[in-house]
Image (tube, rainbow, N blue to C red):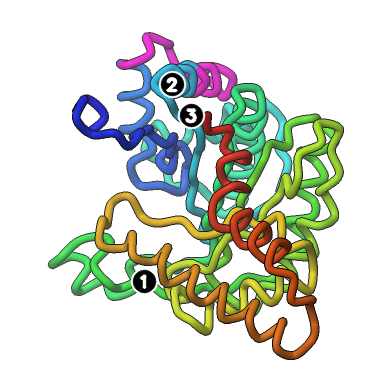
Amino acid sequence: IAEDTAFDTVVAPTFRPDEAFVSHPNFAKFVTRLQEVTGVEVRSFDSFVKALEQRIEFFVANGCKASDISFGEILYKRASKEELDAIFTKVIRGEVPTLEDIQQWQTEVFSALCGLYKKHHLVTQVHFGAVRDTNRKYFEKIGVDAGFDSTGDQTHLALALNQLLNALEESNRLPKCIFYNLNPSYNDILANTLANFQANEEGIKGRLQFGAAWWFSDTEKGMREQMLVLANQSLLWNFVGMLTDSRSFLSYQRHDYFRRILVSLVTEWIESGRIPYDEKLITEFLEAICYKNAKEFFELN
């Protein structure tokens, strides 16, 4: 589509390094492929990050504006370079990583990536909270992404996320982020945690975004709840609004559905007297959420 000159819509790639984490079953194959396409000999954590940056630069050169990653849980456990090199060597040899290995690798690789995303002006998207491929019988028959995933839960989400964001902020590696939470019981935790790290010297409005309702919450109830929590805990005006799954073209109707729900919610606020009936103000508010905020946030010219 990107090469079709008759197609006016800009089609840009998104950087998605899910296989860069030792918890992924294809990690070793990913490292082999990474070496082939970059020419970088990957033998350590530092050389691994160097190769990843080379790929990020390639994506940016081809119009990339955002990254995306999916985590089952938000984790935070620091590690030294020596520990990371040992984890890398272990997994490349075919050994199974321990829970601590997974925690440390996810923390440090994601932190390194965030620094690169900030350097290259990429918006960082994080989808978290899914339990994947739970029906092993039908997973073996049909494969991944076939309807056998669930909403997950985790302990100490608030602590882990605050620690992670604080470490990124202290090391000047905190980029513009959108966090999409699959478990609505964590909506308040996510919204007020992100509010702790909104201040920035660049003057970015809503630098850390509580992303639109996702997956099982792609419903009227889910979208309303997400926007109500955001309005209560932060500033709804700065919300970048709805997104869609580029792999599922039928899901583009989600934007229309979202806008109808947003307008219905705002209408309720007007009729109940909670916000003024000012047509100019309301128009600016809706245009910001449905279009202008995203255009500014993703630096779209």
The 10 Å Cα crowd at callout 3, few under 14, some 14 to 19, many 20 or more, is some
User: Within 10 Å of the Cα at label 1, are there few (<14), some (14-19), or many (20+) other Cα atoms?
Assistant: some
Count the marks.
3
Question: Which residue corresponds to the image point at 48% horizontal and 18% vertical from the top-left?
Answer: 57
Query: Is residue 39 a member of the stretch shown in magenta?
Result: yes
- Residue at x 31% of width, y 33% of height: 29
Which quadrant does the N terminus fall into?
top left
- Residue type highlighted by circle 2: Arg
Viewer-closest of 94 and 38: 38
Q: Secondary structure at mark 2?
A: helix
Residue 38: x %, y % from top left: 38, 13
Principal SS element in the magenta part? Answer: helix
- Of tags 2 and 3, the one toward the viewer is 2
Q: Position of residue 226 (x, y in %)?
A: 62, 73
For label 2, the crowd category at 10 Å Cα-Cα, with few meaning under 14, some 14 to 19 and many 20 or more, is: some
Front of the two marks 3 and 1:
1
Front residue (pair 52, 194):
194
Ranked by sequence position, the earlier of labels 1 and 2 is: 2
Q: CA distance from mark 2 to mark 3?
A: 22 Å
Residues in magenta, as a range: 37-53
**What residue is disc 3 on?**
89
- Which three-letter amino acid code belongs to the residue tagged 3? Thr
Residue 138 can be seen, yes or no: yes
Q: Is residue 6 above or below residue 280?
A: above
- Residue at image position (64%, 62%) is 283
Mark 2 or mark 3: whose residue is earlier in sequence: 2
Q: Are marks 2 and 3 in contact (CB under 8 Å)?
A: no
Q: Earlier in the sequence, mark 3 or mark 1?
A: 3
Element class at badge 1: loop
Name the residue beneath numbered marker 2: 55
